[in-house]
Image (tube, rainbow, N blue to C red):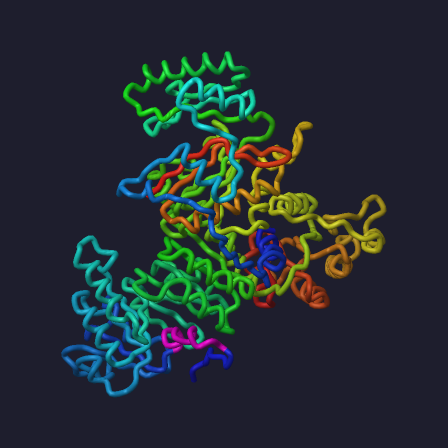
Amino acid sequence: MYCLSELYKYHNMIKNKKYETVTLTPAGIVNLKPCTAGSAPITLNEKALDIIENCGIPVVNRRLASSVDEALKLGGEIGYPVVLKISSPDITHKSDAGGVKLDIKSEAELIQAYREMMEAIRIKAPGARVEGILLQKSESEGTEVILGGKRDPQFGPVLVYGMGGIYAEIMRDVVFRIVPVTHKEAVEMIKETKSYKIISGARSKKPGNIEALAQCIVKLGELLCSRPEITEVDINPLLVKPEECIALDARMVIN
Amino acid sequence: MLISTKSAEEPTDNTSLESFFNPQSVALVGVSSRTGPGTFNVLEQILNSGYRGTIYPVNPRGGSILGVPAYRSVKEISHPIDLAIISTPRSAVPEVVRQCVEKGIPAVIVITQGFSDADDEAGQRMHNEIVEAVKGTATKVVGPNTLGVINNFINFKSAFLEFTTSTNPVGFICQSGIFLAAAKDFTGGIGIGVDIGNTSDVGFAECMEYMAQNPLIKVINLHIEGLQDGRRFMEAARKITPLKPVLALKTGSSEEGSRAASSHSGSLAGEDEVFSAAFNQSGVIRVTEASRLANLNRTLWTYHNMAGKRIGVITISGGAGIMAVDACCKYGLETAGYAPETIALLEEVFPEWMRAGNPADIWPAGMAKGYHKIVSLALDGVLADQGVDAVLCITPAYLDPAEDPLNIVDTINETAARHPDKPTAMWFFGPHKQKYAAKFNETGRVP
């Protein structure tokens, strides 16, 4: 039966298959120069979101505030509720350092949260360079997935896509592709995971936008192909919503 | 008489490997003057193998070895040479390779070990010397650290070991000599094979391209430990797999790559998973258990199509039929739903207390009305059903086929021959299943 199943697969899925050639579109304007000056690998946090936004992946509306007054002004522009995140090149695990505040609903809450965060950072991460506090629009509805990439010594850039969240590494509901990938291959990737059923609307949840998600996968693949200095990237989480896909956080290693 | 595997329309860039697999003349450099058991004399092996090309032994002392005149160096040979097989001590290898390049020998096999596989720096340095010696020239190198090539179609082996392989339309590319010497165990037998060893020059992609255009090869098998250029491999595989099936046995999955990673993506994507992705993306069928390779090869070269995944099961045992249905589900196939005509045909011969369906348990009818007759009728009916894409026949092998009243091999073959587009596979059980399987293999079907 095993042999017959492989025979079936060969004659119906592999034989006479025509492989699409992928033509790479320029990956937007990505200025990595300041990051690549040194020889040691550099990890980017907030800057990673700018880079992926430039390559065509939608990113959450976010602004950097360097004072409480500025935060209040930006909060009004973005619209409540907002999320606060500390912006510091020295802090990688933001929530461990007290550098994340979720669901800020009003100006009063914003003022309090801003002060608490600055105080927490002073205690938990003394000496860390603080560039300010990042205000992000609070996104609720949708399914969190992880989309990332790395460089394999034998195959070069590889995409990783799968279920996000804190148990991602335990559940290992992930798929891999050597990049670049076509839109069709990106859709196949999404459908290969168990979490596809969740994204496509399990338990009366609104279905997520698979087309938009596939587009993000294609775009990240293009970025990895065109920028060999990006050795690792995580978009985690990438929020799959009914109308669109939005990157909420990202990390990138440049070497 | 040499069997030429060249075809008129083959692209020229692939013919460069022809000299490895189909040499008319072979120089054996570094062949020992000692012969007999335990001397691992490649000349002796080739002379005993029935190879019909011309052989030129090269030994610094000259003279003659096993009655064949020996030359002091490659340069002394005035005739054109297709293939040089080098088994000198490693320090002499780079110079011999350079001499082969000067003489314009198109194919060189370096059997000698101790290059990039060695633990010292000198090994790596001499590896680089070989790479440099052939760069930009018309000479290609297989190895070092290899058993070389086998072409069973012309009884040619470059190996210093005696081993037998049965000839099948399978091309085998491996990275370790054991796979070549034990090719029969792993693949069921091969037509041509190559151990690419340390891969100083010729690698998987070129060998696959050669085998793809060789009309004697129907299925390509790979044993992969690692790849030097994964993208070149995928590019070649994407051209070849739509034409011929390529099966890969990937061994040695290291977690080194993922250990060094600092991101989620890095730690999630281990080397082994990346290989699986690459195989999937280029149509290479990954075989995880070596024991499955031989049967899968036979299946792929025997049956030329299978239009869908609906399986009909004809069984002498109800219990075995259920197992077959379980296996269908496990491997993503479906049990066919039979057309009313097929059901009617079966019910006509079935006892009145038995409903017909899939799997069709034919023993009660066979015992009453003749096993051969019922097998033929049921198989013919099921194969003719538009809703069936392939059939599995389950029959016992309790007795030697020569004296077994339940030997239905001929019956199956005659019936299946009327439906050449649909694979009919067999499952024998019982102490004589190997004999039955062999008999069935002879007639070109897969047990």
Residue B28: percent from left, percent from top: 26, 76
Indicate the quadrant where residue A50 lies: top left
Report the side of B110 relative to A217 (left or right). Answer: left
Please give the count of numbered marks on the rendered protein: 0
Furthest residue to the left?
B61
Q: Residue at (56%, 46%) from the top-left corner? A: A186
**Which of A115 and B307 lies nearest the eye of the viewer?**
A115
* B11 to A154, vertically: above or below: below
Answer whether residue B414 is visible to the viewer in this image. Answer: yes
**Which of A220 and B50 lies nearest the eye of the viewer?**
A220
Indicate the quadrant where residue B128 lies: bottom left
Answer whether residue B436 is visible to the viewer in this image. Answer: no
Residue B52: percent from left, percent from top: 37, 82
Name the quadrant of the C terminus of chain B: bottom right
Residue A213: percent from left, percent from top: 57, 40
| Span of residues in magenta | B10-22
Report the side of A153 relative to B102 (left or right). Answer: right
Q: Residue at (28%, 87%) from the top-left corner? A: B79
Q: Residue at (44%, 42%) from the top-left corner? A: A149
Residue B12 in magenta? yes
* A246 to B59, vertically: above or below: above
Residue A27 in magenta? no
Name the quadrant of the N terminus of chain B: bottom left
The kind of secondary structure the magenta stretch mainly shows is helix
Residue B174: percent from left, percent from top: 39, 60
Furthest residue to the bottom?
B78
